[in-house]
Amino acid sequence: MNNRAVTKNVLIAMAILAVAAISIWLLVMQKPAVPVALQDMGGDFQLQSSSGPVSLHDFRGKVTLVYFGYTHCPDICPMALGVMAGAMQQVGAPLADKVAGLFVSVDPRRDTPALLGQYASFFDKRIVGVTGTSQQLDNIAAGWRVDYAVPDQPADTNYSVEHSTFIYMVNPDGKIADLFDEKTDPAVIAGKMRHWLK
């Protein structure tokens, strides 16, 4: 094989490697897409926290985990908040200020903003507890496809609230990007959060 043929083969090989490298770089750097099934879910809202009004758009630029529940929940809510806190912690120090959590109480009769502030921050200081009027919560639930039912009982009674158990992952643009539950490995959620923050 003459020098010209060798040079031509080397150039072809280098071109193939360059194209492969660019393709891999694009795959790694490309932001993930919001699944089609989730594109018509969610929406901005404003509710009350212990320190005043909080809106979902306040968290733009961050990946935010959102959970709907109530503080008197005996098991699933604490498990879900524990998973959220674990995921946020596993995202890592360089991105610690780029993740957040919202715990939306669907039991405003018992869950005051002050109580929610104490409860949510027990799991992680970056999780904000919020609630609102029954009408506000109904409107939000419709857009987020949250099912819940609060019994018509006095606030000082020990009643249970039925509710769906999704942990919603909201991307930096404010769109629901994934769904998890209280049994999801926090490391899985952390990995998906990091992917949106590249």
Image (cartoon, rainbow, N blue to C red):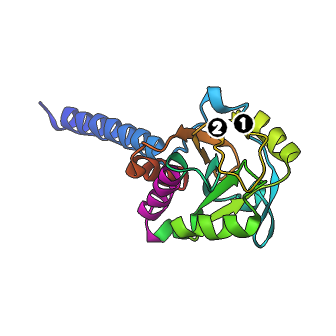
Nearest the viewer among 146 and 152 is: 152
The residue at the point 46 percent across, 56 percent down is 87
Residue for badge 2: 162
Left or right: residue 174 compared with residue 188: right
Three-letter amino acid code at disc 2? Glu
N-terminal-most mark, 1 or 2: 1
Count the numbered circles shown. Answer: 2
Rendered location of residue 17, percent (x, y)? 31, 40
**CB atoms at circles 1 and 2 under 8 Å apart?**
yes
Q: How far apart in space, not on screen, are marks 1 and 2 (Cα)?
A: 5 Å
The percent position of residue 143, horizontal first and vertical second, equals: 77, 35
Amino acid type at circle 1 is: Ala
- Give the labeled residue for mark 1: 149
Q: What percent of the width, then of the height, locates residue 22?
A: 43, 43
**71 with respect to 12 (left or right):** right
At a point 62% along the width and 56% down the height, the residue shown is: 71
Image-based side of 91 in relation to 170, left or right = left
Is 197 or 134 nearer to us in this picture? 134
76 magenta-colored: no
SS at mark 1 in the image: strand
Is 19 rendered above or below residue 133? above
| Residue at the image position 60 percent from the left and 61 percent from the top | 100
Give the prevailing secondary structure in the magenta stretch. helix
Point out the stretch of residues depicted in magenta: 78-93
User: Which label was assigned to residue 64?
Assistant: none
At numbered mark 2, what does the secondary structure look like: helix, strand or loop?
strand
Viewer-nearest residue: 162 or 167: 162
